[in-house]
């Protein structure tokens, strides 16, 4: 199609462009006045037991501890773990991110710390969800050691390094508006051209000079009964 034909097609389907403009305006209003979202984040660490040679637990963080922590995270990411979290009251969007000191090819979780995040519309609710996830994580660590009959003095423990603290998520409105505008203009032009092509094909397939629909000659309307 030439530029002139495209322009004529857009002029013929002006109502499609008008609808696209209305939808774009609704999207822009939603971007300018988004629903409040809050992100709560906390950091926990899996510490070894206190020993005579190493009384400072945080100075004795070894890779085996990170392996145990990552194994518990994998349990919580499984379908059974997700069901357990939902039963504990965890809802919304949440994330468990072990500290990875390896690479994307050979991941090596050498630091036994875990970042727990939750994103909700209520800041208090986001903090509560993070605490519930930490509680479930701690129970899994304890049950794992109980299953191995680890004595209490030799058990690992979970310590809260950074308590949950919810902060409002603020995005870039200019980028969001630019995205909505590009999507609206592109979608409106494509929809108008597609509609014009479809209707033009239907009109071309109709016999020329075809008038309105008529009743078949063999099925005439019955005559009215004489009074």
Image (cartoon, rainbow, N blue to C red):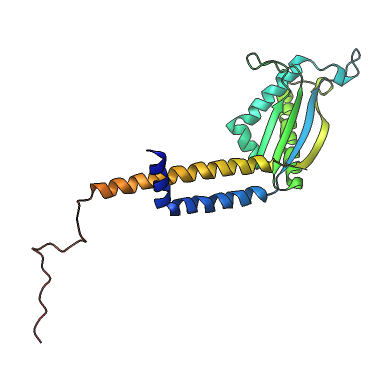
Q: Nearer the viewer, residue 225 or 44?
A: 225
Frontmost residue, 168 versus 119: 168
Q: Quadrant of the N terminus?
A: top left
Tell me what residue is drawn at x 17 percent, y 63 percent: 214
The image quarter containing residue 171 is top right
* Residue 161 shows in this picture: yes
Q: Does the rendering let one see residue 90?
A: no
Q: Viewer-proximal residue, 49 or 107?
A: 107
Quarter of the image with the C terminus in it: bottom left
Q: Residue at x 37, y 47 (%)?
A: 196
Q: Is residue 32 left or right of residue 158?
A: left
Residue 86 at what x, y percent from top left? 64, 40
- Where does the image place residue 182, in percent across and percent down from the top left? 56, 41
Q: Residue at x 46, y 44 (%)?
A: 189
- Image height of 201 relative to 70, above or below: below
Q: Quadrant of residue 119?
A: top right
- How far from the left and from the top, in percent, is residue 19? 48, 53
Query: Can you give x and y, in whole percent of width and height, for residue 202 in the image?
Result: 28, 48
Q: Is residue 89 left or right of residue 154?
A: left
Q: Nearer the viewer, residue 139 or 199?
A: 199
**Residue at 79%, 29% in the rendered image:** 44
């Amino acid at each position: 199609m030439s530029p002139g034909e495209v322009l004529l097609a857009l002029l013929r389907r002006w109502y499609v462009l008008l609808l696209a403009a209305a939808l774009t305006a609704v999207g822009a209003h939603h971007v300018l006045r988004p629903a409040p979202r809050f992100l709560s984040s906390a950091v926990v660490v899996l510490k070894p037991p206190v020993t005579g040679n190493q009384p400072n637990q945080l100075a004795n963080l070894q890779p085996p501890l990170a392996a145990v922590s990552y194994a518990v995270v994998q349990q919580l990411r499984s379908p059974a773990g997700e069901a357990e979290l939902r039963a504990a009251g965890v809802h919304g969007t949440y994330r468990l991110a072990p500290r990875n000191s390896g690479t994307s090819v050979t991941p090596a979780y050498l630091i036994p710390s875990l970042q727990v995040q939750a994103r909700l519309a209520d800041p208090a609710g986001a903090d509560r969800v993070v605490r519930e996830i930490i509680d479930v994580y701690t129970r899994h660590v304890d049950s794992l050691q109980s299953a191995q009959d680890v004595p209490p003095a030799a058990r690992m423990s979970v310590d809260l390094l950074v308590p949950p603290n919810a902060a409002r998520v603020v995005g870039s409105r200019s980028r969001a508006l630019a995205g909505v505008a590009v999507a609206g203009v592109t979608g409106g032009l494509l929809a108008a051209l597609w509609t014009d092509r479809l209707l033009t094909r239907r009109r071309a397939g109709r016999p020329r000079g075809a008038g309105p629909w008529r009743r078949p000659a063999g099925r005439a309307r019955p005559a009215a009964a004489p009074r």
